[in-house]
């Protein structure tokens, strides 16, 4: 730390390390977005970005929303109040839940 006429300046690697950790979390979320988007496309549906989240579209209507949060991936079916929460290590369960929702749409 340096002082410059009453101002406190932060220098060094500490600030850079925090950016790297944060960008690593963003990369994990983006990787999951791409995997989910690819899975939905393989099911014959399309997705739409809404902020950081994905909406799954069936016949022009949103059937569910996939939400990417820091601690979990949430899936909210259209018309339901509650969210099913999954950890980032549960990709198979996430895909199964989305496939189940898509099958109910067809």
Image (cartoon, grey):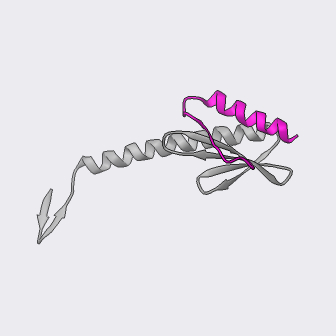
- Percent across and percent down for residue 59 are 86, 50
Q: Is residue 36 toward the left or the right of residue 57 in the image?
A: left
The N terminus appears in which quarter of the rendering? bottom left
Q: Is residue 11 toward the left or the right of residue 4 in the image?
A: right
- Percent across and percent down for residue 95 are 69, 32
- Percent across and percent down for residue 45 are 80, 44
Based on the picture, tell me whether residue 103 belongs to the magenta stretch: yes
Based on the picture, tell me whether residue 52 belongs to the magenta stretch: no
Which residue is depicted at the point 58% across and 53% down? 52
Task: From this view, report whether residue 35 is shown above or below residue 4.
Answer: above
Which residue is depicted at the point 26% across and 47% down? 14
Viewer-closest of 81 and 25? 81
Q: State the residue lying farthest toward the bottom.
A: 5
Provide the residue span drawn in magenta. Answer: 78-106
Which residue is depicted at the point 13% across and 60% down? 2
Q: How many marks?
A: 0
The C terminus appears in which quarter of the rendering? top right
- Percent across and percent down for residue 80 are 71, 46
Which residue is depicted at the point 85% across and 42% down? 105
Q: State the residue lying farthest toward the front.
A: 81
């Amino acid at each position: 730390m340096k002082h410059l006429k009453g101002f406190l300046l932060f220098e060094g690697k500490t600030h850079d390390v925090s950016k790297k950790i944060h960008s690593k979390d963003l990369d994990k979320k983006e990787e999951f977005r791409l995997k989910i988007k690819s899975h939905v496309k393989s099911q014959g549906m399309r997705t739409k970005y809404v902020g950081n989240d994905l909406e799954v579209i069936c016949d022009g209507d949103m059937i569910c929303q996939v939400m990417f949060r820091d601690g979990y991936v949430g899936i909210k079916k259209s018309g339901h109040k509650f969210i099913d929460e999954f950890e980032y290590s549960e990709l198979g369960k996430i895909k199964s839940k989305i496939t189940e929702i898509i099958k109910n749409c067809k």
